[in-house]
Image (cartoon, grey):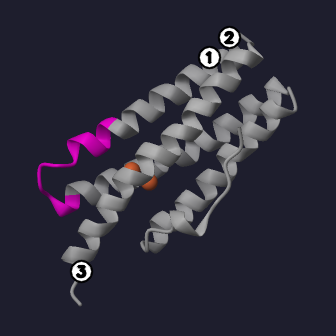
Amino acid sequence: MRIFWQSSMILGLPGIDEDHHRLVAKLDCVCLALHGRNLPAAGRALDDFAVTMVEHFSAEEKLLADMGGGDSDHHISVHRGTADLVDRLRDAITIDQSLAKAEALAAELVNQWIRRLFHEDADLAAKVRDLSPT
Ligand SMILES: [Fe+2]
Ligand SMILES: [Fe+2]
């Protein structure tokens, strides 16, 4: 499983789009290391991805809080679910040292990224656009 940046992932919010571009590249480094059966390299790549991910989620959650409204809970729960998945992947790499388990969890993370996170962020981008003066 690999993940590549695509123009369809652009949401029109420059800071968030730059973060997403970097995160997709970093997540693909994890996939590439697993593809090469190199668990130590996958662990290092995952740590690098996770640092950027935590910063990104916190920036988005600040934006959600600044915009107000009560519908940010689901978005935040998707972030938490992704962070949990990253923790499980780290355990598979560093504790279980199971390539098969790590590959399955990395595939789940890629799917989560494409199917759920971008969906939530697209809603966020639409909300920001609605609130922006024209
Ligand atoms: Fe998000
Ligand atoms: Fe995001």
Determine the residue located farthest toward the bottom in the rendered image. Answer: 134
Q: Mark 2 points at which residue?
A: 95
Could you classify mark 2 by the number of other residues whose Cα lies within 10 Å: few (under 14), some (14-19), or many (20 or more)? few
> CB atoms at circles 2 and 3 under 8 Å apart?
no
**Which x, y percent locates residue 3?**
67, 48
The answer to whether the residue bearing label 3 lies less than 8 angstroms from the nearest atom of ligand 2 is no
Q: Mark 3 points at which residue?
A: 132
Task: Kindly identify the residue that appears in the image at 72 percent across and 38 percent down.
Answer: 30
Could you classify mark 1 by the number of other residues whose Cα lies within 10 Å: few (under 14), some (14-19), or many (20 or more)? some
Q: In the displayed structure, would residue 87 be above or below residue 121? A: above
- Relative placement, left or right, of 119 versus 5 is left
> CB atoms at circles 3 and 1 under 8 Å apart?
no
The answer to whether the residue bearing label 2 lies less than 8 angstroms from the nearest atom of ligand 1 is no
Q: Mark 1 points at which residue?
A: 91
Q: What residue type is labelled 3?
A: Ser
Residue extent of the magenta highlight: 66-77
The answer to whether the residue bearing label 1 lies less than 8 angstroms from the nearest atom of ligand 1 is no
Q: In the displayed structure, would residue 94 be above or below residue 5? A: above
Task: Kindly identify the residue that appears in the image at 60 percent across and 25 percent down.
Answer: 105
Q: Is residue 71 magenta?
A: yes
